[in-house]
């Protein structure tokens, strides 16, 4: 059995200190199942990436898919909200609830990390620390020390992660593994980096969310995908007990291979899910545009109706005032268009906000929440 680290007793605690990546003694075994899954996951990622490149406005998909990953990754940690609450947060009469704020933090954290990468900064600890700072900036306890490695020992189930005094060194070694060239495929490196990050557990809070976000960042940084259009937490959430078991078995049984098999399934099926969803959203937009161009209901306002539809695909929950302002169209014009959309069952009214009635693009939201 492969040994993946050593234990160090400090006081009453027996800390586990992982060996540096990549796995050694023996090296990672690229068995038949891993080779097959690697090919399938790479193909699924390529298909998803190709679709993202030909979309007329990929920004629409990015926002929806980032929200989906943020919600799924957060829900693994018991943080639960809805698409409506995330899209509606600007219009809420009351203060945003904590869970919705934490999901919004995740979205901002990913945006912040991508901005640093786009500026040419490599995926180093500076990026990870800043991302953690943004993730925990609102709605979290100040005791979680946003943007700083932990200064105390913690226990995670049966695991006591490394003592705080060596976290900086361990994270520096992980930084080197992420950025230095190697013979390992980038897709495999991202999976190894995730399990290693979770084992180090460098923060007091937010480790799971940052670790899963790290996968997406590494896939983008290595040009396997161009945009954050994959949500691996879809699979991690669906099989969350196995997720934690596979992470633990790397430490307890040296089973990197078992983790990589699970991880590649997550990438493959998440990419297939995202691709299927994108195809259906693309078809829906074509069908609804065609409806506006042909239905007699829109004969006097086809152009404006098309603009409203386009806006709702960017922001599927909005008020008349917001749409009117963004499109520079009269309030009554937007209202009349939305009344036609309601009649055709394309839009439904949200009456929960008494001071600001909202309108939801029903078929689009159903596709975002659909189980494939």
Image (tube, helix red, strand yellow):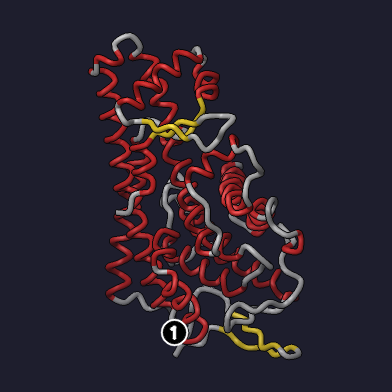
Work out whether 73 lies above or below 321: below
Q: Which of 46 and 14 is in front in this view?
A: 14
Give the number of callouts.
1
Q: Residue 109: x and y, percent?
A: 61, 49
Q: Tell me where residue 210 appears, x and y as whole percent.
A: 58, 60
Is 162 left, or right, of 232 in this rendering? right
- Inspect this view and state whether residue 147 appears: no
Residue for point 47% across, 53% down: 69
Residue most extreme to the top: 300
Q: In which quarter of the image is the C terminus?
A: bottom left
Please name the residue shown 53% across and 44% down the image. Answer: 85
- Where is residue 1, by image quadrant? bottom left
Residue 227 drawn at (x, y percent): 45, 44
**Residue shown at 39% from the left, 62% from the top:** 235
Please name the residue that numbered disc 1 is placed on.
26
**Circle 1 — which element?**
loop
- Mark 1 is surrounded, within 10 Å at the Cα level, by few (under 14), some (14 to 19) or many (20 or more) other residues, namely few
Residue closest to the eye, 163 or 345:
345
In this picture, residue 82 sits left or right of residue 313: right
Would residue 129 be visible to someone looking at this image?
yes
Q: Decide which of 32, 296 is in the foreground and name it.
A: 296
């Amino acid at each position: 059995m492969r040994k993946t680290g050593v234990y160090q007793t400090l006081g009453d605690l027996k800390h586990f200190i992982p060996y540096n990546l990549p796995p050694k003694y023996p090296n990672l075994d690229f068995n038949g199942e891993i080779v097959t899954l690697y090919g399938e996951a790479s193909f699924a990622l390529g298909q998803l990436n190709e679709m993202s490149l030909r979309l007329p406005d990929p920004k629409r998909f990015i926002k929806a898919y980032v929200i989906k990953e943020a919600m799924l990754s957060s829900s693994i940690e018991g943080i639960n909200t809805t698409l409506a609450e995330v899209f509606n947060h600007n219009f809420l009469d009351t203060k945003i609830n904590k869970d919705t704020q934490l999901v919004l933090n995740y979205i901002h954290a990913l945006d912040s990390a991508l901005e640093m990468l786009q500026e040419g900064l490599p995926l180093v600890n500076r990026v990870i620390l800043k991302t953690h700072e943004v993730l925990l900036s609102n709605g979290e306890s100040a005791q979680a020390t946003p943007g700083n490695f932990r200064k105390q020992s913690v226990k995670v189930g049966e695991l006591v992660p490394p003592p705080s005094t060596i976290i900086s060194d361990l994270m520096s070694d992980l930084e080197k593994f992420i950025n230095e060239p190697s013979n390992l495929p980038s897709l495999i490196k991202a999976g190894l980096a995730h399990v290693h990050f979770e084992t180090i557990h460098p923060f007091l809070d937010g480790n799971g969310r940052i670790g899963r976000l790290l996968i997406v960042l590494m896939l983008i940084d290595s040009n396997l995908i161009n945009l954050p259009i994959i949500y691996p937490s879809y699979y991690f959430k669906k099989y969350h007990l196995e997720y934690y078991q596979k992470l633990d078995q790397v430490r307890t049984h040296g089973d990197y291979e078992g983790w990589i098999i699970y991880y590649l399934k997550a990438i493959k099926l998440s990419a297939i899910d995202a691709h299927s969803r994108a195809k259906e959203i693309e078809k829906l937009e074509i069908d609804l545009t065609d409806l506006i161009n042909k239905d007699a209901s829109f004969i006097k306002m086809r152009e404006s109706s098309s603009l409203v539809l386009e806006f709702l695909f960017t922001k599927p929950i909005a008020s008349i005032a917001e749409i009117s302002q963004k499109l520079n169209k009269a309030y009554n014009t937007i209202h009349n268009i939305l009344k036609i959309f309601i009649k055709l069952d394309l839009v439904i009214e949200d009456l929960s906000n008494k001071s600001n009635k909202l309108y939801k693009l029903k078929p689009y939201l159903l596709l975002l929440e659909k189980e494939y």
